[in-house]
Image (cartoon, helix red, strand yellow):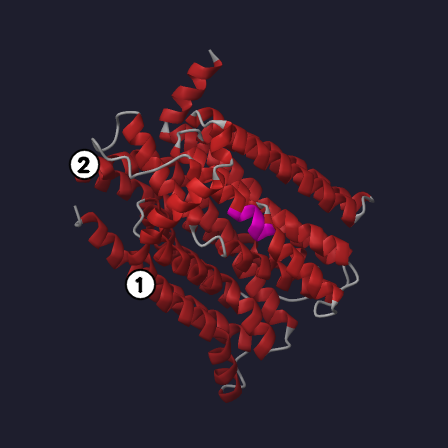
Amino acid sequence: MVRTIIAAGERSTKVVTFAKLINVALVMLWGFAVTFVFVRAMPTNDFRVFLLLVAFNNFTISAEFGFTNVIYARLRRYWLHRTGMGEQDNDGDFRLEEVGVLFLFLCGLMICSSLLVALGIALGWIRTGFPAVLILFFLVSAFNVLLLLSKRALAALDRNLIWEAVDIARRLLALAALFAVLVGLSLLASVAIQLALNILCALFGMFLIHKRTGMRRRQWFAWRTGGRHVRDTYMRDIGSSAALTMSEVAAYNGPYFVIAAVSKDMALILLFDFCFKMIRAVATAIRATIEGALPRLTRHWFAGEMEAFGRALKRAGAMALGIALCAGLVLIAIGQRLFAFLYDGNSSFEMIEVLSLCVLLAVLSIMSVSVYLQGALGRFDKLLRCSLPFLAGSLLAAPLAAVLHAQLTAQPIDHIFMAIYTLVFVAAALLHLASINRLRQSR
């Protein structure tokens, strides 16, 4: 009975999307809750280090080189072929040993990056009064790359609902541990609990993949065979995927470091941190709607049903734009009060900046649909052509704002930065829109 209900839910785009949106709401809450708690539990200098460390962690996650994107595209084609819903006689040359190799690689990545952070703290490169907290929190965040691999693999295997339910439970417990800091729980204990939850969730994800695919235990450890296959087959995609992943993460996180280099104004980095959080929240919500539609979109694409694919794509695009517009309305209504509350009154968020961010989020919807859909279809080289100009514009926004501020002293630097940063997103969205049009005409 339960299996029948779950199977019916997996086939429903609405049910899958609803489950993902619940998870997205928790992701959005988590991003703001971490800032809300840590800014009150840490001195200003330590909190600044914490923000930069989170940004560095995002770069670390990018060092997975887009393997999770590649595994989705390959595993999805394999699964559709295996279940009789894909192209005949074309399973993409996928082997189950690939999954074990990727888990091993990502575990190694997490360990190495965490050791680098610990070394930086030990040598005094990272100065903080909370060394253990920062190292453990870095591990908590780094574990997201393993959780992401589980999520993508299970999505390719039509096991969205089970994973989302487990992930929702994990996030709720993690939020409880985080807010417990405000009523007396130590930061160290809170972060340790969050790390334990992430480890358990990653192990459960591996178990679900094992059961769904029918993997044998030895296939998890056939690293030589799997590694050779990954080397021989992934090289077709991994160059573009790796460059794309690094470019996207650098474009979104790089301004943290650029702003710290060109300006000592805490207000500017807090402004960007708020923009980053809103971008991530809206992009994550859009991703949930796209992922809910991906089973149908990928089936239509791989079967060559382009008319049905076009209709589904229009619905997904309309939903994405709707999410961005709703976020904009919320910002106009409460954005300034939310900003002041979140950063404990350390800075202000003026209406001109609110409106700029609303425009930015609207065009972000186009970029998000393009990236998530074309990534699932393995079109990494096409996405890279859009991403590189976006990276350049994103990294140049703060230095250009500083130069213009020196010439236009009457204009605050944060106003100038927001105007330039928004224009960068508009230009990138136009490139993605052209790429989507080519996608619809390519088959």
Dominant SS type (magenta) = helix
Q: Amino acid at mark 1?
A: Arg
The residue shown at (45%, 54%) is 65
- Looking at the picture, how far across and down is residue 210, in whole percent? 48, 28
Residue range in magenta is: 105-110
Three-letter code, disc 2? Glu
Disc 1 residue crowd, few under 14, some 14–19, many 20+, Cα 10 Å: some
Rendered residue at 73%/64% (across/down): 121
Toward the viewer: 191 or 9?
191
Label 2 sits on residue? 305
The residue tagged 1 is: 385
- When the figure is inspected, residue 415 is found, relative to residue 196, above or below; the finding is below
Quarter of the picture containing the C terminus is: top left
Q: Answer with the quarter of the image where residue 335 lies.
A: bottom right
Say which element carries label 2.
Answer: loop
Along the polypeptide, which appears first: circle 1 or circle 2?
A: 2
Q: Nearer the viewer, residue 29 or 88?
A: 88
